[in-house]
Amino acid sequence: MRSALSIRAALVLATAVLLGGTLLAVPSGPTHALPPEDTARAAGCRAPNCWTAISFNTKTGYSGWTTPERGRSTKAAAMRAALEKCRSRPVNARARSSCLRPSVREVYRRNGCVAVFFRRRDGRIVEWARGKADTETPAKRQARRAVNDGPGEIVFSRLACGLRRF
């Protein structure tokens, strides 16, 4: 009985060693560096320049933005696309001129995220702010903290992220 347990333990140990050695021999990822084009690939974007922007409408609270799929390789192109989207949205039809250029409050970011929050009181937007960061949560947190806790309702408007090069 003792010899059967010893043999069983030896077999388990041998299997573990063999399996462990096999797992160590298999590469877990690419063995060469990826080119920059593969780390941030999107139509219109060329690493390391993938810009995103938000154009905020101060009357309606609705925004225009660029998306990762339609990222822009220049800041000017991203800002122009966001402004055009804001002005062309049906919800902004009666207030197209209230879409602000992203450059007004630097609501743009290269290879990261931008977010907009606003405070509404009595149906009017009384304050708005933007946040910029490498990822979504810090950008939203920064924008939210920039809006004062005054009377009225604080509303999240938009988050836009470009592709990030790691």
Image (cartoon, rainbow, N blue to C red):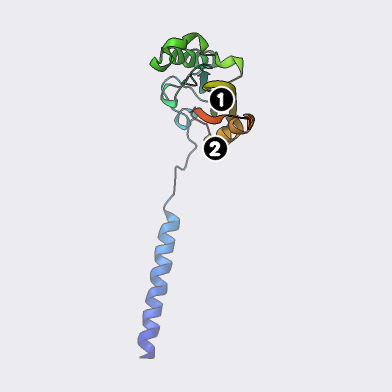
Viewer-proximal residue, 33 or 43? Answer: 43
Is 141 located above or below residue 50 in the figure? below
Q: Please identify the quarter of the rendering in which residue 43 is found.
A: top left
Residue 137, disc: 2
Q: Amino acid at mark 2?
A: Thr
Viewer-proximal residue, 98 or 21? Answer: 98
Which residue: 50% across, 18% down? Answer: 73
Q: Amino acid at mark 1?
A: Arg
Q: Please identify the quarter of the rendering in which residue 115 is found.
A: top right
Residue 53 percent across, percent down from the top left: 52, 21
Q: How many numbered marks appear?
A: 2
Image quadrant containing the N terminus: bottom left
Which residue: 44% across, 15% down? Answer: 92
Q: Please identify the quarter of the rendering in which residue 118 is found.
A: top right
Q: Secondary structure at mark 2?
A: helix
Residue 2 percent across, percent down from the top left: 39, 90
Is 65 located above or below residue 150 in the figure? above
Q: Residue furthest top?
A: 97
Q: Which residue position is annotated with label 1?
A: 121
Is 81 located above or below residue 111 in the figure? above
Is 153 located above or below residue 51 in the figure? below
Q: Residue furthest bottom?
A: 1
Taking 104 as reference, is 43 left or right? left
Which residue: 52% across, 12% down? Answer: 98
Distance from disc 2 to disc 1, alpha carbons, whole Å, reads 26 Å
Residue 99, disc: none
